[in-house]
Structures are given as structure tokens and as C-alpha cells.
Image (cartoon, grey):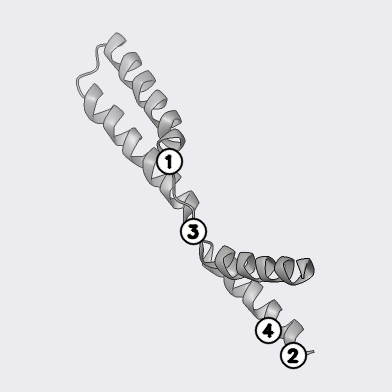
Amino acid sequence: MSNLILICVFIVIICVGESVKASPTSHDFIPCQKMAVIILDNCLKEGGSSCWLDSKSHYKICRQRVIQSYLPDAERIRAEQKLREKREAQ
């Protein structure tokens, strides 16, 4: 009986695990916030005229990179699917 439960749990994990996608949390954006503050601070110390825009621009780019890092790698996924299909055909 316990083996049957383990097998069912394993199957559920495999099926659900393939469809679950992670997304960034607020913690992932902390480095972006710190970088934006440093850029703003340094710019203000140097007497720059577009400090806020520069800081905000760098923050947005950093955010985009963080979000992009959580997107699934479509090419890798396709390669894994082809490999799985190849194994099943054998």
C-alpha cells in the first residue's frame, strides 16, 4: 500500500513540476534597488543633471533582467522533450 502511495506522489510531482513556473519575489529585486541608490548617490555627488533618470533607467534594466531570468528556456525545454520522446521510442 505504501509503495502505491509513493508511486502516486511521484507521478503527481513529475506532472505538476513540469507545469510550475517560478516568478521573481521582492527579494530578487533588492540588488536592483541597491544599484539604483548607488548610481543616484554617485551622480548627485558629482553634480549630474539627470541623476534620477539615470538611476531609474538602470533600475528598470535590472528589473527586466531579473524577470527574464525566471522565464523558461524554450530551447532547453524542446531539447528535453525530444530526448524524452527518443527514449520512449526505444
User: Which residue is at the far front?
Assistant: 1
Residue depicted at x 51% and y 67%? 19
Residue at the disc numbered 2:
89
The reply, left or right, for residue 74 in relation to residue 41 is right
Q: Nearer the viewer, mark 3 or mark 4?
A: 3
Q: CA distance from mark 2 to mark 4?
A: 6 Å
Q: Nearer the viewer, mark 4 or mark 1?
A: 1
Which quadrant holds the N terminus? bottom right
Compare marks 2 and 3 and give the one earlier in the sequence.
3
Compare marks 3 and 4 and give the one earlier in the sequence.
3
Q: Quadrant of residue 5?
A: bottom right
| Label 2 crowd bin: few (<14), some (14–19), many (20+), radius 10 Å | few
Residue at the disc numbered 1:
25
Foreground residue among 78 and 43:
78
Q: Amino acid at mark 2?
A: Ala
Q: Quadrant of residue 90?
A: bottom right
Residue at the disc numbered 3:
21
Q: CA distance from mark 1 to mark 2?
A: 40 Å
Label 4: which secondary element: helix
Q: CA distance from mark 4 to mark 1?
A: 34 Å
Label 3: which secondary element: loop
User: Which residue is at the far top?
Assistant: 45
Q: CA distance from mark 3 to mark 4?
A: 22 Å
Residue at the disc numbered 4:
85
* Image coordinates for residue 28, horizontal then vertical, percent: 46, 37
* Image coordinates for residue 7, horizontal then vertical, percent: 73, 70
Q: CA distance from mark 2 to mark 3?
A: 28 Å
Q: Is residue 61 above or below residue 74?
A: above
